[in-house]
């Protein structure tokens, strides 16, 4: 059954990082092939198109400078998880990304956020997504299950743990999208997420089915196009132009797909949401 609804755009505040030093020189996910050429200029142009799309629709975008030796800093979603002005910073699984944590922590502190240092391995909003007042937390490849307990304690929120099983979808934000990013009693109770069922184990699929029965279930073809690595303001959904089936599903539900091509940045295993960290004041 198709569910249509009146959608409202909510002004968002994001943190992004211009990929001035983007390249792929190591492999920590299946998308990264160091022998495959990358085009930094093209990556910057595609990133700029996403930045411009956010600004054109009224969203505020803050910037953190990319450190030359840290090409993956462009994927700012992994730089922390922020609610109520408190920033829970990452502790990356792979050594190649661990130096990023100090730069994100410094940025948060300099911009008035309360910084919470982690004890557990976590990769920020890559594996933690806020739906209403509930944190959906991913594990299986990067963030550990202990970080789910820790993030719940830091923010005093309910946490639902979800296990990823396909290494191509190594972070939660590659397999699940929050479509209505509103907290508190005004949060939409139904159809708040879209997800790729085949990326999760059976237990996690059961949790998602029970909690979000009206969620959009996305086909493998659109998942393979990194379609779930999307960002939404509640009306506009910034999505890969290759995820045409997902875009049609969104339109049927009253959302407005905004296609943005980040194919060059996908060579590093990241897309729209990976380049976008929500700053919740």
Image: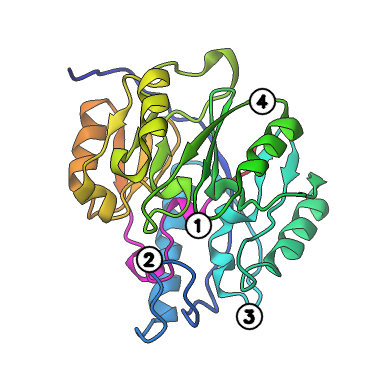
Q: Residues within 10 Å of mark 1 (few under 14, many from 20)?
A: many
Q: Nearer the viewer, mark 2 or mark 3?
A: 2
- Identify the residue under disc 2: 266
Q: Quadrant of residue 9?
A: top left
- Give the residue pinned by disc 4: 157
Classify 10 Å Cα crowding around label 4: few (below 14), some (14-19), many (20 and above). Answer: some
Kindly identify the residue that appears in the image at 43 percent across and 70 percent down. Answer: 268
Q: Is residue 205 above or below residue 272?
A: above
Q: Which structural element holds mark 1? A: helix
Snapshot quadrant of residue 17: bottom right
Q: In what element is the residue under mark 4?
A: loop
Closer to us: mark 4 or mark 3?
Answer: 4
| Of residues 159 and 264, the one drawn nearer to the viewer in this rendering | 159
Residue at coordinates 46% horizontally, 41% vertically from top-left? 163
Determine the CA span between mark 4 and mark 1: 25 Å
Q: CA distance from mark 4 to mark 2?
A: 32 Å
Q: Which residue is mark 1?
A: 275
């Amino acid at each position: 059954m198709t569910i249509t609804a009146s959608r409202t755009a909510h002004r968002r505040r994001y943190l992004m990082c211009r990929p001035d030093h983007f390249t792929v020189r190591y492999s920590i996910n299946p998308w990264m092939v160091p022998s495959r050429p990358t085009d930094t200029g093209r990556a910057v142009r595609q990133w700029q198109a996403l930045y411009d799309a956010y600004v054109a629709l009224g969203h505020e975008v803050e910037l953190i400078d990319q450190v030359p030796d840290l090409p993956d800093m462009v994927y700012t979603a992994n730089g922390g998880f922020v609610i109520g002005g408190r920033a829970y910073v990452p502790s990356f699984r792979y050594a190649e990304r661990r130096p990023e944590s100090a730069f994100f922590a410094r940025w948060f502190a300099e911009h008035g956020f309360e910084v919470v240092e982690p004890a557990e391995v976590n990769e920020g909003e890559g594996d933690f997504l806020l739906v209403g007042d509930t944190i959906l937390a991913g594990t299986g490849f990067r963030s550990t299950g202990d970080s789910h307990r820790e993030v719940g304690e830091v923010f005093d929120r309910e946490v639902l743990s979800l296990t990823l099983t396909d290494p191509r979808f190594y972070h939660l934000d590659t397999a699940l999208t929050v479509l209505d990013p509103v907290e508190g009693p005004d949060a939409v109770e139904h159809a708040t997420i879209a997800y790729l069922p085949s990326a999760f184990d059976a237990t996690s699929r059961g949790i998602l089915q029970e909690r979000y029965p009206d969620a959009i279930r996305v086909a493998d073809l659109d998942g393979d196009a990194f379609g779930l690595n999307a960002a939404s303001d509640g009306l506009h959904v910034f999505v890969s132009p290759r995820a045409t089936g997902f875009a049609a599903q969104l339109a049927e539900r009253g959302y407005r797909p905004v296609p943005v091509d980040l194919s060059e940045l996908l060579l590093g295993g990241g897309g729209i949401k990976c380049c976008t960290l929500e700053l919740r004041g």
